[in-house]
Amino acid sequence: MAKKQTFESKLHRHAKGGGVKAFKLVYSSKSPKSGAWKFTERFLHIPLDEDEKLQLDATIAEMEAQQN
């Protein structure tokens, strides 16, 4: 079967303005029961037209507030 979508068509699809940037946040926390450190992942999707630095800072501040 022929391939219906090429890599170039994927690039043009994201350039139309409907795409998002994906960030993976990895943070550590200490378990209150066992005292062991655990790592947690969180994916954050930010639209292309928004400032990622502001969104990341707000998300990190929110996660720190939840831990304390």
Image (cartoon, rainbow, N blue to C red):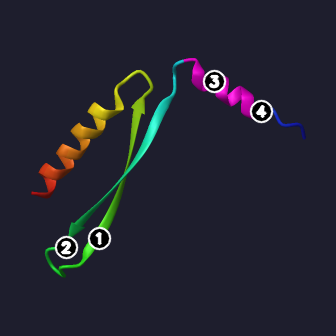
Q: Of the residues shown, which amino acid type is indicated by label 4?
A: Thr
Q: Amino acid at mark 2?
A: Ser
Q: Residues within 10 Å of mark 1 (few under 14, many from 20)?
A: few
Residue at mark 4? 6
Residue at disc 1, secondary structure: strand
Q: Of the numbered discs in the image, which one, if any, rests on residue 38? A: 1
The quarter of the picture where residue 4 lies is top right
Q: CA distance from mark 2 to mark 4?
A: 47 Å
What is the span of residues highlighted in magenta in the rendered image? 7-16
C-beta proximity under 8 Å, tags 1 and 2? yes
**Residue 1 position (above or below residue 16):** below
Q: What residue is shown with label 3?
A: 13
Q: Residue furthest top?
A: 16
Q: CA distance from mark 3 to mark 1?
A: 38 Å
Residue at the image point whose x is 25% and y is 73% from the top: 37
Question: For this rendering, which residue is in front, 31 or 50?
Answer: 50
Q: Which residue is mark 2?
A: 31
- Residue 13 shown left or right of residue 50 in the figure: right
Residue 46: x percent and y percent?
A: 39, 32
